[in-house]
Image: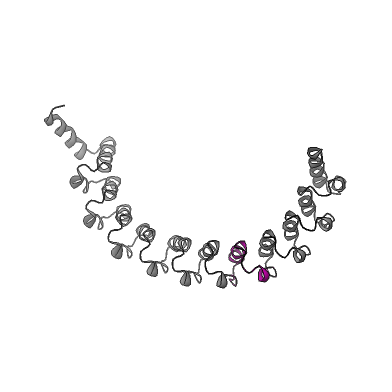
Amino acid sequence: MKNNDATEVLNYILYSKGQDAHDARKILARHGFCLETLIHDEDVSVRCAVARQGYGLDILIHDNSPCVRANVADQGYGLDTLVDDDDPLVRMAVARQGFGFEKLVYDDDREIRRYLASKGYGVKTLIHDKDPIVRRILADNGYGLDVLIKDDEPCVRMAVAEQGYGLEILVNDIDPDVRKTVAQQGFGLEKLIKDKFFYVRKAVAQQGFGLDILINDKNPQVRNAVAEQGYGLEILVDDKNENVRNYAMQLLRYKN
């Protein structure tokens, strides 16, 4: 192709409005061509591609598209400005850079605060966050357990128990789901075998504890959990509950 022909094709791509031309301009931007022109492209995805090249960030930081500004933040540019951006998409990009968490822990967008919690940023503030999921994420990652063990939300205390922390306290928790989680950690089984909630006792059976007692439990789901352990199948095939009988019979046949 002659140089004049190539220039005509390039100009067509740069200044046409069709989707094919847009796609071609994105390809150009991704490969670092014609960035001085493409930085002003009408297509947001093209300008995003330019930003990802690290080109013209001083201009694109003021782009009217949050997507473009977020890509600027992804380059680590202008974070001290973008941390105050009006759009949460941009502020999230700033958070991903590990910048400005002292301010972002108070962000109105809970997804930003949840992200910070997952990374262990601003723990001392986020352990008091109004969103229980933020606090649960902290516990899931082992942060602030000494405070979160006293959290008002059972789901947070469950996460603390899942970390194996404070089980000697949580075994007496008011919420049965928390006590169930303690049982799943294999702790306090001699106490929890007597719990009034069947699914706590079921969790005890699933730990293989106290099967000689739980085989006579009043709840069929507990007895079924005993069968799952392969215990007392010869007895459970005559269980008063049809589901337990059938399950025990199935296991016994498989065992034999």
Where is residue 34, by image quadrant? top left
Residue 46 vertical position relative to residue 197 in the rendered view, above or below = above
Residue drawn at x 53%, y 69% as measured from the top left: 144
Relative image position of residue 123 (x, y in whole percent):
47, 69
Quarter of the image for residue 132 reads: bottom right
Q: Position of residue 106 (x, y in %)?
A: 42, 69
Q: Is residue 203 left or right of residue 10?
A: right
Q: Nearer the viewer, residue 144 or 195?
A: 144
> Taking the image as drawn, is residue 173 in sight?
no
Which residue corresponds to the image point at 61% horizontal and 61% vertical from the top-left? 162
Asked which colour scheme the image uses, the reply is one colour
Quadrant the C terminus occupies: top right
Residue for point 77% across, 62% down: 193
Q: Is residue 3 left or right of residue 64?
A: left
What segment is highlighted magenta in the picture? 149-174
Is residue 115 a member of the stretch shown in magenta? no
- Specify the quadrant that holds the N terminus: top left
> Residue 24's quadrant in the figure?
top left
Answer left or right for 167 relative to 98: right
